[in-house]
Image (tube, coloured by chain):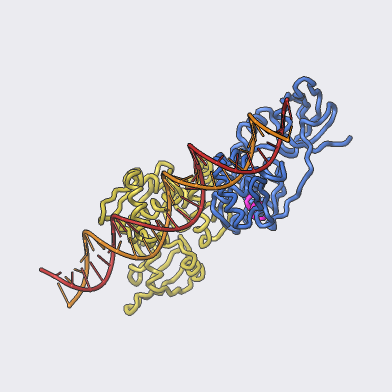
Chain colours: A yellow, B blue, C orange, D red
Amino acid sequence: MGSLTEENYIKSIYALSQVTGEVYVSELARKLEVKLPTVNSMVKRLATKKLVAYAPYKGVRLTERGKKEALSIVRKHRLAELFLVKIMSLGWEEVHDIAEQLEHVNSERFYNRIDEMLNYPKADPHGEPIPDSNGKIQVQKRTSLGDLAEGETAIIAAVAEDEKSFLDHLNAKQLQIGDRITIMKKELFDNSITLKHKSGKKILLTHQVAERIWVEVIIP
Amino acid sequence: MGSLTEENYIKSIYALSQVTGEVYVSELARKLEVKLPTVNSMVKRLATKKLVAYAPYKGVRLTERGKKEALSIVRKHRLAELFLVKIMSLGWEEVHDIAEQLEHVNSERFYNRIDEMLNYPKADPHGEPIPDSNGKIQVQKRTSLGDLAEGETAIIAAVAEDEKSFLDHLNAKQLQIGDRITIMKKELFDNSITLKHKSGKKILLTHQVAERIWVEVIIP
DNA sequence: ACCAAATGTTAGATTATACTAATATTTTAA
DNA sequence: TTAAAATATTAGTATAATCTAACATTTGGT
């Protein structure tokens, strides 16, 4: 295991590579809120440690070793989030920052006990899959709520953001993981959607919000 | 709040000052397992930050600000230990190292919730008092088991060591916080003692062990 | 009261992680 | 297809936290 900083780079590279495959130095700089040369030198260091493959002016990619380390951190983060929600009764919108710190705790015992207390969960409070202790993760193909057509019915499976402001927004709209919803109306002009919630309520979402919600479509 | 390293210095200065009042650079170096010049320069830095009072060749002493910071870390450490034992069912001998990491977690919410779940406890699993959220700590005068005379009866109140090997030893002897014991025999030669446990068992302890156990004497 | 032992400080080097300023490469768009 | 824009790298600097080697002060025993 490397330093806290190294762990954060590895984690960010992993997160960004889920979207784009290859990760660019500038993306990393933006995500980690440091300047380009800082990322550049760190990436070179990670490369000498064989955690990433890197060629100048090309992107960065995690090696097998790097990916393993990333998944270990992701596992700890997601277990921590679920623990904070399920065992400690905190809200899903407030656990991210605490989990960012807990994910660096180095103790098999601690995390295996959390896993056990949660009965070996498969997903965190945001619906993201939790890698098992061997680093295996269930990849799920995802449909965005923003892509559904009028009349379609789906179940909210996950959200693409951990940010408090986003989750506060969903709380205010009373949307939760597991909720069944049906698209009533999709506006051509701005792609905003009106959906019917199982509770009977009608909920209006902008496209910006809808595209960050992953769903499992129910084929009638 | 300072860096993790700073927090560890403050915590160690606090711990050592409980014994000696003033803390010497060499003691700190031994405790933190770094060399003297390292401590020297860090102590100077802490002094410019007004966390310690320090004059060259004299000892180090926490300022009010430093003491407040120390107590906040001690509070988090002890709450974490009790949480790990009571809520997560880990053994008292294995929680120290995890708590050393958790004590640096920066989240009022997290620690207030732990405090609440534990019902605002007064002592950690080793019997050490937990400062409240204002940094108030109950100081207790302590008698060492090693100082009791034959025939005296007492209740084990705390242990002076967090180290796994010591706690494993107590586990093996089946001694716990809260146990009532009576001194059967105290050897003049090596100060080892034989005590009677409430369970009826006779237990032999060397002075080295006995002096690390704090008791509350029962006046008959 | 003095010198040796114990303890503490200074000077200078090293590594990790960051920065700014200058330079180089790649991509894009006219 | 070439110049501007976007992106990436290098060079040089800074700070935190550590070290070793050399030097300074304090303490304790005769």
- Check the image and report above or below for B8 versus A190: above
Q: Specify the farthest residue to the right.
A: B220
* Residue A157 can be seen, yes or no: no
- Residue at screen point 66% across, 37% down: B161
Q: Residue at x 61, y 54 (%)?
A: B47
The stretch drawn in magenta includes residue B72: yes
Q: Quadrant of residue B100?
A: top right
**A10 relative to B168 in the view: left or right:** left
Is residue B31 a member of the stretch shown in magenta?
no
Q: Is residue B41 above or below residue A34?
A: above
- If the image is split into quadrants, where does the C terminus of chain B sit? top right
Tell me where residue A134 appears, x and y as whole percent.
40, 41
The dominant secondary structure in magenta is helix
x, y percent for residue B189: 77, 20
Q: Position of residue A93 (x, y in %)?
A: 51, 62
Task: Tell me the quarter of the picture where residue B169 sits.
Answer: top right
Q: Which residues are magenta?
A: B68-73
Q: Nearer the viewer, residue A41 or B178?
A: A41
Q: Is D23 situated left or right of C20 in this image?
A: right
Q: Residue furthest bottom?
A: A189
Res B138 seen here: yes
Nearest the eye: B102 or A74: B102
Instruction: Looking at the picture, tell me which residue is in the foreground, A166 or D6.
Output: D6
Looking at the image, residue A115 lies above or below residue C22: above
- Quadrant including the N terminus of chain B: bottom right
Q: Position of residue B173 (x, y in %)?
A: 68, 28
